């Protein structure tokens, strides 16, 4: 798959090596075509979901970010030895089994996961553990482009809405505003606010966790610190969105237009920026260790 730097010896010895490299490229070309044929419906529906669903629109950028990290590792890939590993075939079979189960159940989440599993298994099987280790992070990154099943999404969004509403009510009460909460609805003397999914933190959380994964990998070597950064993305997103709801409640007291339209969308963007800034600040305080993206291991 990857071109190797070879010592120049006798001209005749170069021809078998060239044939091996060519056959490797042809082999991957054939496999990629087979994967496209097998997963064509999955890929089409996947792309449409990412395009139409604001909760996962960041997923459209994930493959390009993954390619960037692969390109950054190109020097390491050229030096790595090709050593096919039969254990990779077990990963391929596990991925194909996941695809079959997803197809039987007409469930796209499992089928999408299976494509990533099969891809990593093929890398391990055909190229070996060293190259699979170098490409582990770019492949893992692809999982963040897979939308959650809506049964899981709704199960997470509902409690987040309630938490965001409760926190927003407490903030408004601190400012001396008469406030009454009814589920995810906030009653104020001048207006009524409904904390919907977009205001619960779930929408920004999807993108924030992806950025937390990148941030944790780039700034820390410790597994504990990486996991901590990703876990902290959840309360940060909820607190930031609760602050947004409270701010809307305060601002609409003076001008109802500030709770809708451009200002409403702008406040959502600012919440995301503040959330990521807080996450980066915590990561910095934990002590960072920058890593070169050209490392030869998966980290």
Image (tube, helix red, strand yellow):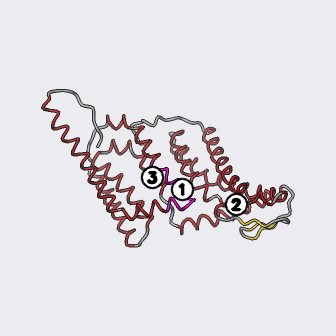
Cα gap from disc 2 to disc 3, whole angstroms: 29 Å
Residue 22 or residue 240, whichever sits in front: 22
Is 50 a magenta residue?
yes
- Under circle 3, the secondary element is helix
| Residue at the (18%, 41%) spot, across then down | 19
In the image, residue 157 lies at what x, y percent? 61, 64
In the image, residue 285 lies at what x, y percent? 63, 38
In the image, residue 175 lies at what x, y percent? 84, 55
Local packing at callout 3 (Cα closer than 10 Å; few below 14, some 14-19, many 20+) is many
- Pointer 1: what residue? 57
Is 123 a magenta residue?
no
- Under circle 2, the secondary element is helix
Give the main secondary structure, helix, strand or loop, of the magenta stretch.
Answer: helix
In the image, residue 180 lies at what x, y percent? 81, 67
Of the image marks 2 and 3, the number of the one nearer the N terminus: 3
User: What range is drawn magenta here?
Assistant: 49-63
Local packing at callout 2 (Cα closer than 10 Å; few below 14, some 14-19, many 20+) is many
71 over 97 or under it: above or below = above
Front position among marks 1 and 3? 1
Q: Quadrant of residue 37?
A: bottom left
237 over 215 or under it: above or below = below
- Pointer 3: what residue? 142
Q: Quadrant of residue 12?
A: top left
- Pointer 2: what residue? 164
Cα gap from disc 1 to disc 2, whole angstroms: 23 Å
Q: Are marks 1 and 3 in contact (CB under 8 Å)?
A: no
Of the image marks 1 and 3, the number of the one nearer the N terminus: 1
Of the image marks 1 and 2, the number of the one nearer the N terminus: 1
16 relative to 75 in the view: left or right: left
294 relative to 186 in the view: left or right: left
């Amino acid at each position: 798959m990857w071109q190797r730097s070879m010592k120049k010896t006798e001209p005749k010895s170069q021809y078998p090596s060239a044939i091996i490299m060519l056959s490797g490229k042809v082999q991957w070309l054939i496999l990629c075509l087979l994967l496209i044929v097998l997963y064509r419906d999955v890929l089409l529906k996947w792309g449409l979901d990412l395009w139409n669903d604001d909760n996962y629109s960041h997923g459209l950028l994930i493959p390009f970010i993954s390619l960037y990290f692969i390109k950054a590792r190109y020097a390491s890939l050229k030096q790595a030895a090709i050593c096919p590993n039969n254990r990779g075939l077990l990963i391929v079979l596990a991925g194909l089994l996941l695809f079959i189960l997803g197809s039987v159940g007409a469930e796209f989440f499992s089928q999408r996961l299976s494509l990533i599993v099969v891809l990593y298994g093929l890398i391990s099987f055909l190229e070996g553990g060293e190259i699979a280790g170098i490409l582990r992070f770019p492949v893992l990154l692809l999982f963040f482009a897979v939308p959650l099943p809506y049964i899981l999404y709704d199960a997470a969004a509902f409690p987040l809405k309630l938490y965001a509403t409760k926190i927003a009510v407490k903030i408004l009460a601190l400012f001396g505003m008469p406030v009454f909460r009814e589920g995810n609805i906030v009653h104020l003397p001048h207006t009524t606010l409904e904390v919907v999914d977009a205001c619960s933190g779930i929408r920004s959380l999807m993108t924030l966790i992806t950025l937390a994964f990148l941030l944790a990998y780039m700034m820390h070597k410790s597994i504990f610190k990486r996991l901590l950064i990703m876990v902290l993305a959840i309360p940060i997103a909820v607190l930031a969105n609760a602050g947004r709801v409270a701010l809307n409640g305060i601002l609409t007291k003076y001008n109802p237009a500030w709770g809708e339209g451009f200002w409403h969308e702008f406040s959502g963007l600012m919440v995301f920026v503040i959330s990521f800034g807080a996450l980066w600040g915590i990561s910095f305080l934990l002590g960072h260790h920058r890593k070169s993206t050209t490392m030869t291991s998966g980290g």
